C-alpha cells in the first residue's frame, strides 16, 4: 500500500516510532507496514484488541466508554490510541481503529469506523489525541472494508503528522 510508504517516510523524516491499536482491521495495518524493508526501526507493533473485554483488560479502555457511547465511537478510538501509546514508551505516535464492518451491523453503524491518532510530546510528555470517522461503502465486502479501513488509518496518521 502506497499509504504505508508515505507513513514510513513521515516517521523516518521525524526520527520517531509508531504503535497501533487495532480492532476491526485485525492487525492488517501493522501487517501492511511490516512489508516495508527496514520498518523495524519505525514500527513498535500493534495490539489487536477485537473484543470489548480485551480493549478494557489489555489496553485499559474504560468499561463505561465501551458501554456508552460504545465501542464504535470517537471516545473509544482516542482511548485506544492513548492507551497503546502509554504502554509503548519508545513510540511518539499511536494510531487506533475501531468500527463495525458487518455483516449484521446496526444500520447506523454499518461501515462506520473511527480512527484515533495520539501524539506524545517527548518521553513522558503530554499526549494529544484526535479522532476522525469514515463511512465505508455498503458495496464493499468485509475484506474490502478492512483494506479501506487500513488505508484510512494510514492516511489519517500521515495527515496528523503533516499538521504538526
Image: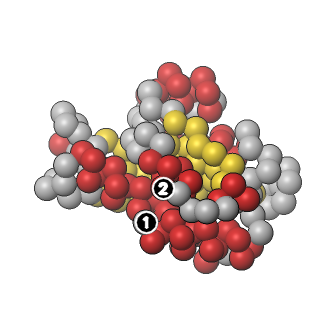
Callout 2: SS? helix
**Which residue occupies the foreground of this view, 142 or 159?**
142
Q: How crowded is mark 2: few (under 14 residues within 10 Å), some or many (20 or more)?
A: some
Q: Residue 1 carries which label?
A: 1
**Which residue occupies the foreground of this view, 111 or 35?**
35
The x and y percentages for residue 60 are 63, 30
Point 34% across, 50% down: residue: 146
**Which residue occupies the foreground of this view, 39 or 46?**
39
Considering the image in quadrants, where does the N terminus appear? Answer: bottom left
Q: Is residue 144 above or below residue 12?
A: above
Considering the image in quadrants, where does the C terminus appear? Answer: bottom right
The x and y percentages for residue 135 are 29, 57
Looking at this rendering, what residue extends furthest in the left direction? 139
The colour mode here is: secondary structure
Q: Name the residue under label 2.
A: 32
The quarter of the picture where residue 80 lies is: top right
The x and y percentages for residue 133 are 39, 57
- Asked if labels 2 and 1 touch by Cβ distance under 8 angstroms, the answer is yes
> Residue 14 vs residue 98: left or right?
right
> Residue 71 vs residue 118: left or right?
left
Point 74% across, 73% down: residue: 14
Callout 1: SS? loop
Looking at this rendering, what residue extends furthest in the front direction? 37
Amino acid at each position: 500500500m502506497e499509504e504505508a510508504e508515505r507513513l514510513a517516510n513521515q516517521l523516518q523524516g521525524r526520527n520517531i516510532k509508531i504503535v497501533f491499536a487495532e480492532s476491526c482491521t485485525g492487525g492488517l495495518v501493522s501487517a501492511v507496514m511490516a512489508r516495508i524493508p527496514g520498518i523495524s526501526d519505525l514500527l513498535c507493533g500493534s495490539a489487536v484488541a477485537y473484543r470489548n473485554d480485551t480493549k478494557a483488560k489489555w489496553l485499559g479502555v474504560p468499561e463505561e466508554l465501551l458501554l456508552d457511547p460504545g465501542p464504535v465511537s470517537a471516545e473509544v478510538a482516542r482511548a485506544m490510541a492513548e492507551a497503546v501509546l502509554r504502554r509503548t514508551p519508545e513510540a511518539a505516535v499511536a494510531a487506533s481503529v475501531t468500527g463495525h464492518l458487518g455483516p449484521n451491523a446496526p444500520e447506523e453503524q454499518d461501515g462506520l469506523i473511527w480512527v484515533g491518532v495520539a501524539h506524545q510530546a517527548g518521553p513522558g510528555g503530554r499526549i494529544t489525541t484526535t479522532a476522525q470517522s469514515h463511512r465505508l461503502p455498503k458495496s464493499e465486502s468485509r475484506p474490502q472494508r478492512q483494506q479501506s479501513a487500513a488505508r484510512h488509518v494510514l492516511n489519517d496518521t500521515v495527515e496528523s503528522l503533516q499538521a504538526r
